[in-house]
Amino acid sequence: MNDALLVSTVSSKGDACKNHWCAGPIKPRQAIEPAGKGTYRMDSTTVLRDQSTRSQISVWMQAVRVRSLIISSVSVFVGGALAYNYGHFDLLRLFLAWLCAVAVQSGTNLTNVHYNYKTRGRGAALDHIDPRGSTVVVEQGLLTSAKVWTGALFAFALGVASGLILISMTSWWLLLVGLAGTIAGYSYAGPPLRLSYFGMGVPTVFIFMGPAMVSGTFYAMAGSVSWGALAASISVGLMAANILHINDIRDLETDVSHHKHTITTLVGRRGAVALLVSSEIVAYVVITSAALAGVLPWAVLFTLVTLLRAIPLARTVSAETTQDGLHIAWVLGVRLHMEFGVVLILSLIAARALNL
């Protein structure tokens, strides 16, 4: 899979995106030097000069972490594929569900940038920055914190508007899901809850990238939630949550030093690795059991081919202790989520189209 699709998703630092696509290739003349885990030291004048020629679109794309939106997109499209498999597909409702999901995730990402910058303050901005992260657009003055916050409010408003249109076409029960998702999106990094700072980051991602988005999209078309939709949503949610969980394992020492509480800081590295492997197993067991029970078509068993990615991922997380090594594991986790979701979507569509 093309590395350009790697997602920075729900990074525990908000700006700890370590993939080159986040801000484009790093130019040699920027003379970036490592300055501790997850940070870089560079000449601020050089960076500002190099970044000043960027378009506002590219700056906003970096702030939003636009490629991370593939995670919510996969969840919605799995829900749409399930509805198609059950004979209830509606393209307009799928589009509205997708727009709502990516808008709320965009608002979440921008809220993360805004509050992470406010928490850290400008003092560290030009000394230790990662030019590929999302908060760096504020640290380098490409966007003000106020503009980022305005962008977050706009994204949330777009999500609410598209959600209300979808609700008017379906059921007001979806309002509960939409309100909960919007509140959780803000509260992921925003006060007073700051879920990601109190061990609730991974569970939040699981709930809203899994059952909420997958089953919610299915409900918007079918008017009910099936056991098959619930099973698929659990597996997809676990795959999405594992991306953040690997990120937390990688950033364990940094989180401890910043007094940030994650599941990994609570159970320790060994416990976190065990939890990761267990959640992977559960994801495959749930989707396989659903196929064997007849609540999902047998074609979804093709998702088992992604074990070729899951097994190396588990081995890498178990063996590696360095940030570089665990970053490789994080990349594998991103690919696993993408590949599992795509295979699941295609298998559901094929099962209906070919009457399998």
Image (spheres, rainbow, N blue to C red):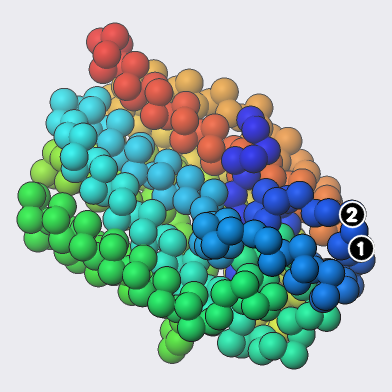
Amino acid type at image mark 1: Ala
Q: Within 10 angstroms of label 1, few (less than 14), some, or many (20 or more) residues?
A: few
Image point (47%, 30%), residue name: 342
Horizontal side of 51 relative to 30 (left or right) equals left
Q: Within 10 angstroms of label 2, few (less than 14), some, or many (20 or more) residues?
A: few
Q: Quadrant of residue 59?
A: bottom right
- Residue 108 in view in this figure: yes
Between 150 and 345, the residue placed more toward the observer is: 150
Image point (24%, 41%), residue name: 94
* Residue tagged 2: 28
The x and y percentages for residue 326 are: 78, 53
Q: Secondary structure at mark 2?
A: helix
Q: Secondary structure at mark 1?
A: loop
Horizontal side of 44 relative to 122 (left or right) equals right
Q: Quadrant of residue 250?
A: bottom right
Q: How many marks?
A: 2
Q: Quadrant of the C terminus?
A: top left
Q: Is residue 154 above or below residue 95?
A: below
Horizontal side of 71 relative to 297 (left or right) equals right
The x and y percentages for residue 343 are: 47, 26
The x and y percentages for residue 1 are: 63, 30
- Residue 278 in view in this figure: no
The x and y percentages for residue 112 are: 53, 73
Q: Is residue 159 above or below residue 78?
A: below
Residue 31's disc is 1
Image point (59%, 49%), residue name: 7
Residue 234's disc is none
Q: Quadrant of residue 104?
A: bottom left
Between 277 and 320, the residue placed more toward the observer is: 320
Spatial CA span between label 2 and label 1: 6 Å
Image point (68%, 61%), residue name: 53
